[in-house]
Amino acid sequence: MLTVQGFGRVPELVAGLTRDLRVLWALEELGLPYELEGLDFQHLATPEHLARSPFAQLPTVEDDGLTLSESGEILCYLAEKAGVAGDMRKRAELNRWCFAALSSLEPAVLVVNLMEFQNSDAGGMKPQLVKFVERGLGGFERRLATREFVVDEFSIADILLTTVLRQLDGLGIIDKFPHVVAHKQRCEARPAFQRVLDAQEDRLGVPRGAARRTIPERRAMPRPS
């Protein structure tokens, strides 16, 4: 059975945004059995965990002697394990859009997200970063204009795109991209994702709905001491 190391405790402020949710969502969709080991932040710098994740991050996955870190790679592995990655050509197309979500979109999204939480424009750089995000969104908008999901059927590419875009909830940045908005709503409504969010709220002991708050709603919350 797969063992997932995920967050056992995080501030309520980031409930529903942690990267272990990508892996748990994929496992639920693929129907792969797993057990979850919840770790706190102080465990990430231990020798045991650094052997799993050189960068002291979560999630990590252990499967029959194989240890993986990096959420994108883990999802690619799970698709292979479940037999849904397809032949070499299909796999290449799937990887193309997974990498697009992680490299063409997420780095700038992360910085914009951090600026929003800190109420900062980093010396006037924020508009330029938003433009960079919009350029990436434009690529996905064109892709989704003629299809329901990023690749032929729902896949790990949709999971990665959706979890990246959730970091912009409530900021209005994606609103000018109607196909992206519709895709995100379709994916978030999937029962497997709702189960994962509910389970994280239960695990963290936070109020129901905490993992579904927008960024402005989170920003208005008291900061953890």
Image (cartoon, rainbow, N blue to C red):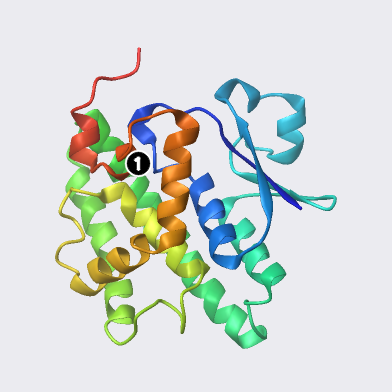
Asked which secondary structure carries label 1, the reply is helix
> Measuring 24% from the left and 20% from the top, which residue is drawn there?
222
In the image, taking residue 96 as reference, residue 83 lies left or right, namely: right
Residue 123 visible in the snapshot: no
Residue under label 1: 211
Residue 11 visible in the snapshot: yes
Mark 1, other Cα within 10 Å: few <14 / some 14–19 / many ≥20: many
Numbered label tally: 1
In the image, taking residue 19 as reference, residue 91 lies left or right, namely: right
Q: Quadrant of residue 77?
A: bottom right
Going by the picture, which residue comes out furthest to the right?
Answer: 65
> Measuring 32% from the left and 68% from the top, which residue is drawn there?
186
Image location (x, y in percent) of residue 205:
43, 28
> Measuring 32% from the left and 52% from the top, which residue is drawn there?
166
Camera-side residue of 72 and 123: 72
Image location (x, y in percent) of residue 97:
47, 72
Camera-side residue of 45 and 188: 188
Camera-side residue of 31 and 46: 31
Q: Quadrant of residue 60?
A: top right
- Amino acid at pointer 1: Ala
> Measuring 34% from the left and 17% from the top, which residue is drawn there?
224
In the image, taking residue 170 as reference, residue 21 lies left or right, namely: right
In the image, taking residue 181 as reference, residue 104 lies left or right, namely: right
Image location (x, y in percent) of residue 143:
33, 80
In this rendering, is residue 72 above or below 153?
Answer: above
Image quarter (top left, top right, bottom left or bottom right) of the C terminus = top left
In this rendering, is residue 42 above or below 91?
Answer: above
